[in-house]
Image (cartoon, helix red, strand yellow):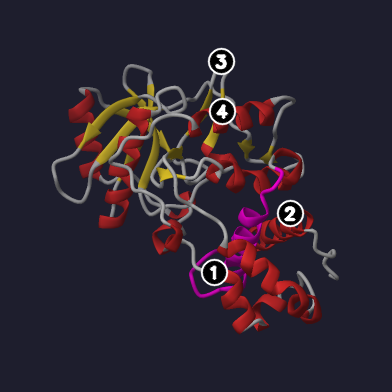
Amino acid sequence: MADRYVPSGLQGAPPAALTARVEAALGRAWSAWSKPSTGLSAAHRFLVELDDGTSVFVKGATTAQTAAWLRNERAALGAAPAFAPKEVAWIDDGDDFPILVVEALVEAYWPVQAGGTQWRAGDLERVFAAIKALSELQPPPVLPADQNQRASDGWKTILASPEAFLRLQLCSAAWLDRHGETLSSAAAALDWRGEAFVHGDMRSDNICLTDDAVTFVDWSEARRGAAATDLALFLPTAHLEGGPAPASVMPHGGPWAAQQSAELALRAADETRGAPPWLLRVFRRLARINLDWAIEDLGLPARDK
């Protein structure tokens, strides 16, 4: 995950080799470029204006890991055209530095903006419907399949050594002693397996809207799995941004909420992975939302902090 924690603002100018390869593939020169204001990835990412006045989005691998993500993303794009940006060019010489060029979507509405996330009336309902429709598509067999061992039991980790978790001030030690095993059992019952199309990184900065479409970007973690995966991941973030409580959209989501609350709490408590402080704070807030979702669904007493 270390590759993920590289803000766009810390990346430099486009390397000459990247520019040359894209210009050769498109037969057009770059006239201007900018970096996206959101996202965390070690991959090169540039919004590029070409000499004919059109714009494209360029994403180039920088490591073997980002190359694998990019090849996975390209496979997913072709299988979900109604929900993905259109491919403009794919540049892959068989090395560890493929390049994906897609439409820029500069005319779309992006809810994540410089001043914060702004969902317009009806936007979230459209996104929820699009997530459900995506899950009903047939995913390409080349996408990896989710397995239950993918998710370790975070609550067992927390219960074995609760000090870092308790410093997050989500509950007292007494509350955790009484109800931690129930949360652990719920998380352990979660079944990630399935043949639904899973985007895998469903968050607000990966979503834009036009009058007739909802488009998801950054498909590097796309896979085959349980149909509820993307919605369960997105609902707590949507609630943090002013959307409905997760339980009102996805009742009986207790196992998802329990698993996600532990995973996010462990991330929030771990300052050794290189995540910036603001991201650790977001992890904590999302852990709290998921924990309250799990508590409601599982019928547990409210947190005492």
Camera-near label (4 vs 1) is 1
Inspect the magenta stretch and tell me whether residue 232 lies in it: no
In the picture of the structure, the residue carrying the numbered disc 4 is 130
Could you tell me residue 289's position as x and y percent?
A: 73, 55
Quadrant of the snapshot with the C terminus: bottom right
Judged from the image, the secondary structure of the residue bearing numbered disc 2 is helix
Could you tell me residue 185's position as x and y percent?
A: 62, 67
Which callout, 2 or 1, points at the residue further toward the start of the chain? Answer: 1
Q: Amino acid at mark 3?
A: Asp
- Viewer-nearest residue: 274 or 204: 204
Camera-near label (3 vs 2) is 2
Which callout, 4 or 1, points at the residue further toward the start of the chain? Answer: 4
C-alpha distance separating marks 4 and 2: 22 Å
C-alpha distance separating marks 3 and 1: 41 Å
In the picture of the structure, the residue carrying the numbered disc 2 is 293
In this picture, residue 265 sits left or right of residue 94 = right
Q: Amino acid at mark 2?
A: Trp
Q: Residues within 10 Å of mark 2 (few under 14, many from 20)?
A: many
Q: Is residue 116 above or below residue 289?
A: above
